[in-house]
Image (spheres, helix red, strand yellow):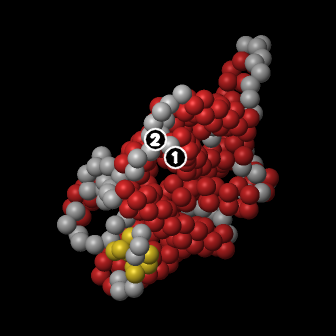
Amino acid sequence: MTQGAFTSLPTRVGVAVVGIPLILWLTYEGGYFFFAFVALISALSLHEFYALQERRGSFPLKSVGLVAGFLVTAAFIYPRFHLQLFRFLEERGMRLAMFSPLQFLLVVLLLFCLIALTIELFRAKCSPSGNLGATVLGVMVISLFFGCLIGIREVFPYGFPVNKFLSTFPQDEAREAVIDRWGAYTMISLFATIWICDTAAYFVGSKFGKHKLFERVSPKKSWEGAIAGFVAAALTMVVAKEIALEYLSVGHAVTIGMLIGSFGQMGDLVESRFKRDVGVKDSSSIIPGHGGVYDRFDSLVFVSPIVYLYLDFIVLS
């Protein structure tokens, strides 16, 4: 979030009043609803990223990248689809050989690289290395990272270690409801923590910011704002743990908050570096008062793989 004047604040608030409840509802519903939301913001962010690369003289393979990006994001909903299709066919006495989730992701990435290399062989636009670098980087940094949001939401119904947390819970259906609720609240807490982190950094930095954080990349950001965002993120996750995330310890909640408070702001700086490279303020103007989709979700895209790995390999392992 860009620090500075408050002139666009009414527009920003108006968009938030409409957008936030919709995002929260899609997150709570989970499943294919949440997948559709993530796939949409991932595709729009990737399109904006490719537009930035075109401004600096590269010619990414946009169509190939967008298709590959969608499939990479879909790899994180694939376990749900795989199990549902398997049960559907089994009930009808049929079997179908299918990729495992990891195999599906690897096949998509390998085919994507091979197809991109082959197409670039016959193109005569600018630098092949620059074109391929922009194409592949967009899919890996945006589509793959955004897919981790689905991974976080889906790991609860499809990979949650029930015996570690709910071994004495009496009813299977009740356990499933609790676990799914934890998945929804975890994602909502992630969104809320990032929004509160950005808001604290924005207001504190705008009013009290004196020391530049990273002037070469983002001249208006300050250490005062960054520290305020970091502290706010840690406190928000502790509050979320006390209200809704019973499976988390206080230590894990603080750690996740600290990861969000640091890597979220780093994601903002990374996107600012891309924009400064081509001399633009926003990745697009699709969201009134907020700029582009990538502008709005730049912190989220950087945080999602970090939190996904921490939850899956440390908290739930």
- Discs 1/2, front: 2
Residue occupying the point 36% across, 74% down: 219
Mark 1 crowdedness (10 Å alpha carbons): few <14, some 14-19, many ≥20:
some
Q: Is residue 267 above or below residue 283?
A: below
Q: Residue at x 33, y 59 (%)?
A: 279
Identify residue type, mark 1.
Gly
The answer to whether 3 appears left or right of 177 in the picture is left
| Residue of label 1 | 130
Mark 2 burial class by Cα count in 10 Å: few <14, some 14-19, many 20+: few
Q: Secondary structure at mark 1?
A: helix
Circle 2 sits on which residue?
126
Cα separation, mark 1 vs mark 2, equals: 8 Å
Task: Tell me the quarter of the picture where residue 122 sits.
Answer: top right
Mark 1 and mark 2 residues within 8 Å of each other at the beta carbon: yes
Amino acid found under the numbered disc labelled 2 = Cys
Q: Which residue occupies 44% across, 62% down?
A: 273
Residue 148 showing in the rendered view: yes
Between residues 63 and 304, which one lies in front from this camera angle? 63
